[in-house]
Amino acid sequence: MCRISPHSFAPMSGLAQYELQQGDGGASVLALSGPYLVSTVGAVDAELRALEGPIAKVDLSGLSEIDTVGAWIACSLATEHEAEIVGASDRATRLISALDGTRGEEEIAAPRLPVWERVPAAMGEKVFGARRGVIGVIGFLGALIAATGTLIRHPRRFRWLALVRQLELVGVSALPIVGLMSFLIGIVIAQQGAVQLAQFGAETLTVNLVGRITLRELGVLMTAIMVAGRSGSAFAAQLGTMKLTEEVDAMRTIGIAPMEALVIPRILAAVLMMPLLGFYASGVAIIGGAVIGDVMLGIPFWTFLARIQDVVPIYDLWVGLIKAPVFGLIVALAGCYHGMQVEGNSEQVGLRTTMAVVSAIFAVIVIDAFFAVFFTEIGWG
Amino acid sequence: MAEDETGRQLGRHERYRGDYPIVVEGLKNQFGEQVVHENLDLKVRRGEILGVVGGSGTGKSVLMRSIIGLQTPTEGDIKVFGRSITKADPDAEIGVRNRWGVLFQGGALFSTLTVGENVQVPLKQFYPEIRPELLEEIARFKTVLSGLPEEAASKFPSELSGGMKKRAGLARALALDPELLFLDEPTAGLDPIGAAAFDRLTRELKETLGLTVFLITHDLDTLHEICDRVAVLADKRVIAVDTVPNLMQLDHPWIQEYFNGPRGRAALTAQALDELRRHMDNPIAAHAVKALDNSHDKRA
């Protein structure tokens, strides 16, 4: 590609420099001097490329140092102006001949369509993606039910240890944060409620407000959101990473069904722990309300708690406890499903974890709305 | 800035001209109770390919991680290009990072970037003034120089085979035209043909670019074919650094088993055969090759 003639040596300087000399016969000689390295050529590269021809020779005898990038530039210049390279040192000659045949036009970035094709393509991708997603979720649910059936027929295959471990991670370790959150929520409801109810002289109804709203709605709902953030995301990230590192494939080849070993313990743990956590959250919230009652409203702490028994109908407790396992199922299902969908690279893990949390919280709130209407209709209002 | 043996500061654009780009003295690495290295000394000569061998768990990778500053040793000093790196913060700018390239075992390519973009990462990090057009050209020719087809530049690492990932990792390691190249088991997991090609590539690049290569390997063929010297790690230190023929004379049980075991012999025979085949015009050599081939066929 480049014609090379041998060389002579020259003095050093700290910067990459060049000079266009008028040679004999009208043809000019481009003399490069100083170090032509990846660290120095950035400064002169644009100017060199902009040089007007014709250039007959590229003289490298003034170069103090050269690396592949310097050789590349010399070679490009020579090719572009159909010039001859002269004065190349042994090293330069070696580098230039090594670069022979590496010139290409291929794009570096991943192929990218123009915007008018990209936007419809992305929309279409979303539509088909949604369809695939629905089919995927239904398929996952089916595989889950099938695996559950297998486990019921072969109960010895059930992984108790994994379940206990997940119960601890989902439930026990969540106690401090869920407790703190619920306590604060109880305080806020009681304090804000009391201010509003005081306008009607009905401060004592604060007890009803705190008791009913936490047991029916907020205790379980906030817990579900917290579990989605804590455990749903952890499920997705764990399973996703295991898929990337081929651990899931390794389990399959050993004969361990990932559904049985990974997914069912997690889902079961969430379903079992959600009612307990939800009830605990409601209880702590009521205590928070009682503290405010004592401090702000002059209702003694124990009187507040005793009043709860009188004013909160028992079905409020059932409403909360019935919703809780359903929410747990949704959260764990979203986490495990998205985790198992990870493929390709680490970016997918992050993406799927986000999707798991967002879709879980969204689904929980939608289902909660249905539950609200349903329980009112059956007279548990 | 790095400096040479005489203590002179090495200029920013100057190549290292000292004799030993890597000097390890009295290295000790300890993890909890477990001592991996103790009193380990090693000098790597400029312009050589130094193979590092040792049984599993003798700390070959730990040694490499110590030298490139990812692992702070418990004791001892490591100088790279005359600059002590053991006292520096692992993330601090120490003036030698643009002088070395590292190929990790799995390639360690950034999975969200294409191969070409992977090559551009170190370039952009150190030389932000380089124009995007030149960056692209550099990424492209480095990719090809590492033995990948041109179209691989726009592919993501997940779309590449194991061997191609290693070559892509090599392209990134060579992005800054380093003087020192670290290779961690470059031929592990490659088929024999791919491994031989990678060895040849390493040798060629070393000669063309004037590299010093620190190469961790288990591959006996690699040791015989391309290593100028081999350092043997055992008993928590480097027990010998020498050429393969000289090492085979040594009376250490591990070295004997390693080089003179069945696999070591096979690699040696293969190398001898190769050598003989180059002199087929000599009747004695031709006869020897024939005899060796025949004996091999009979055994098979």
Image (cartoon, coloured by chain):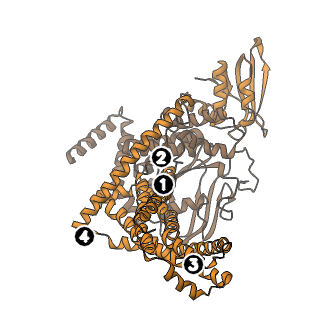
Where is residue B108 shown, x and y percent of the image?
A: 51, 51
What amino acid is at disc 1? Ser
Q: Mark 3 sits on what residue?
A: A207
Q: Nearer the viewer, residue B284 or A215?
A: A215
- Do marks 3 and 1 share a chain? yes
Q: Which mark is residue A359?
A: 1
Q: Residues within 10 Å of mark 2 (few under 14, many from 20)?
A: some
Q: Nearer the viewer, residue B135 or A119?
A: A119
> From mark 3 to mark 1, how far is it between C-alphas?
34 Å
Question: Which residue is found at the position 59% from the left and 77% from the top?
Answer: A205
- Do marks 4 and 3 share a chain? yes
For chain B, what colour was chosen?
A: brown
Q: Quadrant of residue A378?
A: bottom left
Q: Nearer the viewer, residue A376 or A186?
A: A376
Q: How crowded is mark 4: few (under 14 residues within 10 Å), some or many (20 or more)?
A: few
Q: Mark 2 sits on what residue?
A: B226
- Do marks 4 and 1 share a chain? yes
What amino acid is at disc 4? Pro
Where is residue A216 shown, x and y percent of the image?
A: 48, 70
Q: Which of B95 and B115 is in front in this view?
A: B115
Q: Mark 4 sits on what residue?
A: A155
What letter labels the chain drawn in orange? A
Instruction: Residue B34: tell me if it is visible.
Output: no
Instruction: Residue A198: tell me if it is visible.
Output: yes
> From mark 4 to mark 3, how far is it between C-alphas?
47 Å
